[in-house]
Image: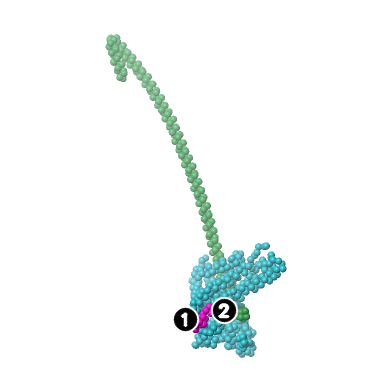
Chain colours: A green, B cyan
């Protein structure tokens, strides 16, 4: 302890105090302050960049979710439209079919009626012709009858045979 | 570009510090063999002991080695600035002619000065030469206030200059970009280390900023000085009790003056303790903060650095002490290996002591500025 006290130099203490004081002041002004400030700004910058990146990521996520929703909606709409179109198509085909059927039926009916009329007219005409023919034949028969009965019969027969051939 | 050159210079100095351990061993040996007090070699245990004791002290010149054959000293003088009974006296230490035993008397305007064991004495009026008593204390001379640029002061100035250059360069580097280049890349993590590992956790997020200037300066100041002590230049600045006392007083003044209201309330009138005990506790706490804590700081640093230098030099001295026993080769080899080993440990201790001093300073500051929740 005595040795320590003997070694203690007040002058050195004083010089050290002065040097340390000046050094602290100078270092604060020229080194520590700018260094620590730069470090702080850099760290803040990094933190902000990370924060904004995180924000961007969340936004991106939201956007993607929105996109997905929109896509789903569009798909549903498309499906609905397709369904509607299909239904409409089916309906139209159905309508067209039934209309065509009714029309066809009408045409067939008409045709049948026309055929029937034609038939009747033909039968009537035939009947008239047969009657006229019959009258002619009868006239001819009657003309010949007067001469020969047997010849009359023969004639009638031949006429009838002709008639049936006709 | 200038920044780059400066940092290269700084690296060169730092590398010199780190790699000079071996050189120290060799240089130290040369030093010891050639060192003299009256031309004798240093080879008895007593002489070695005296030589080590001499090294551990501050000195007034920058001594490299002495050539005994020609009697020349390789050294450069440093200015002596003393406050004597007659006022300020300034001269170069070369006027003492390397005398350290009070033989050479320097007369400066009516004041007779002499140097005994690295300390400057003023002879009493009329005395022509120093008279020693039985304990080798000067009888007719007294110490003067010595503001000399001693080796330690020179070391501190050198360290201060290095710090200003290196960290100034780092600070300027930030103007060019957010990321430092060159040697700044080494320094920046150290600054961040002090801030994030020492100051922030101990002082607290809100208040640490105010003390960063002191803590960073002290940390690098002690560290660089400790490392300088490992070079063959033979600085022993942090092993000077005056230096560590000064550092500890700075810490004490800072935490005593920045103490919060809560700190003083808790120190002087501890709540939750019987009233009779409170004055007693106040005395104990006060002594703790004003005396014991700074004392522990200063003794820890001083003792560690002094012990380091002492052990290292003793191991180097083994080379001479054990020469007769083992022969010159074996003793030199042994001394070299042991000195190298302890030097590596000293490099760690150099950092550790700087770290511990800064750590404890910030811990004490943290205690003083802490604001407690009300009980």
Q: In the image, what residue occupies the spot 43% across and 33% down? A: A97
Q: Residues within 10 Å of mark 2 (few under 14, many from 20)?
A: many
Compared to residue B274, the image places residue A89 above or below, namely above
Compared to residue A24, the image places residue A55 above or below, namely above
Q: Residues within 10 Å of mark 1 (few under 14, many from 20)?
A: few
Residue B326 is one of the magenta-drawn residues: yes
Task: Return the mark for residue B152.
Answer: 2
Q: In the image, what residue occupies the spot 65% across and 64% down? A: B372
Q: In the image, what residue occupies the spot 55% across and 66% down? A: A39
- State left or right for residue A93 relative to residue B116: left
Compared to residue A70, the image places residue B100 above or below, namely below
Residue A15 is one of the magenta-drawn residues: no
Pair 2/1: label in front: 1
Name the secondary structure under disc 1: helix
Image quadrant assignment for residue B305: bottom right
Q: Are marks 2 and 1 in contact (CB under 8 Å)?
A: no
The residue that label 1 is drawn on is B329
- Residues under labels 2 and 1: Cα distance? 35 Å
Does residue B159 appear in the picture of this structure? no
Frontmost residue, A54 versus B256: B256
Q: From this viewpoint, which residue is outermost toward the front?
A: B325
Mark 2 vs mark 1: which is more N-terminal? 2
Does residue B93 appear in the picture of this structure? yes
Image quadrant assignment for residue A11: bottom right
- Where in the figure is residue B2, as x and y percent of width and height? 50, 72
Subunit ID for the residue under disc 2 = B
Image quadrant assignment for residue B197: bottom right
Question: Which range of residues does the magenta coloring cover?
Answer: B310-333
Frontmost residue, B362 versus B175: B362
- Where in the figure is residue B334, as x and y percent of width and height? 49, 78
State the count of labels.
Answer: 2
């Amino acid at each position: 302890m005595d040795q320590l006290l003997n070694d203690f130099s007040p002058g050195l203490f004083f010089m050290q105090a002065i040097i340390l004081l000046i050094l602290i002041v100078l270092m604060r002004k020229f080194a520590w302050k700018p260094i620590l400030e730069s470090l702080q700004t850099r760290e803040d910058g990094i933190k902000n960049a990370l924060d904004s990146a995180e924000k961007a990521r969340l936004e991106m996520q939201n956007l993607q979710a929105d996109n997905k929703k929109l896509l789903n909606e569009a798909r549903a709409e498309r499906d609905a439209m397709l369904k509607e179109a299909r239904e409409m198509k089916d309906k139209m085909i159905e309508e067209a079919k039934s209309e065509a059927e009714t029309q066809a039926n009408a045409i067939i009916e008409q045709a049948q009626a026309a055929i029937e009329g034609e038939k009747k007219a033909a039968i009537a005409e035939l009947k008239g012709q047969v009657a006229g023919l019959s009258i002619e034949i009868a006239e001819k028969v009657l003309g010949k009858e007067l001469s020969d009965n047997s010849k009359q019969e023969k004639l009638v027969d031949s006429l009838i045979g002709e008639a049936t051939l006709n | 570009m200038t920044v780059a050159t400066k940092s290269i210079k700084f690296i060169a100095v730092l590398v010199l510090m780190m790699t000079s351990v071996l050189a120290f061993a060799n240089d130290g040996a040369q030093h010891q063999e050639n060192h003299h007090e009256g031309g004798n070699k240093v080879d008895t245990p007593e002489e070695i002991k005296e030589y080590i004791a001499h090294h551990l002290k501050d000195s007034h010149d920058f001594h490299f080695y002495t050539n005994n054959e020609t009697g020349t000293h390789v050294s450069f003088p440093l200015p002596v600035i003393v406050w004597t009974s007659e006022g300020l006296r300034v001269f170069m230490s070369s006027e003492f002619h390397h005398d350290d035993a009070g033989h050479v008397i320097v007369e400066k305007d009516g004041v007779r000065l002499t140097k005994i064991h690295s300390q400057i004495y003023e002879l009493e009026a009329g005395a022509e030469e120093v008279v020693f008593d039985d304990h080798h204390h000067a009888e007719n001379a007294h110490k003067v206030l010595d503001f000399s640029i001693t080796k330690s002061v020179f070391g501190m100035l050198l360290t201060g200059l290095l710090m200003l250059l290196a960290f100034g360069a780092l600070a300027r580097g930030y103007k060019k970009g957010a990321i430092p280049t060159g040697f700044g890349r080494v320094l920046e993590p150290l600054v961040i280390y002090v801030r994030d590992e020492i100051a922030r956790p101990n002082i607290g997020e809100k208040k640490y900023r105010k003390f960063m200037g002191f803590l960073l300066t002290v940390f690098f100041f002690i560290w660089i000085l400790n490392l300088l002590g490992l070079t063959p230049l033979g600085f022993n600045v942090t092993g000077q009790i005056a230096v560590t006392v000064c550092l500890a007083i700075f810490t004490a003044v800072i935490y005593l003056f920045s103490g919060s209201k809560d700190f003083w309330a808790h120190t002087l009138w501890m709540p939750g303790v019987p009233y009779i005990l409170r004055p007693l506790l106040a005395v104990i706490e006060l002594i703790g903060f004003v005396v014991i804590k700074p004392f522990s700081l200063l003794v820890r640093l001083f003792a560690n650095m002094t012990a380091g230098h002492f052990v290292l030099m003793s191991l180097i001295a083994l080379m001479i002490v054990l020469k007769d026993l083992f022969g010159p080769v074996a003793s030199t080899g042994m001394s070299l290996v042991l000195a190298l080993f302890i030097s590596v440990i000293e490099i760690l201790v150099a950092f550790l002591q700087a770290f511990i001093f800064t750590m404890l300073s910030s811990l004490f500051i943290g205690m003083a500025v802490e604001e407690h929740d009300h009980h």
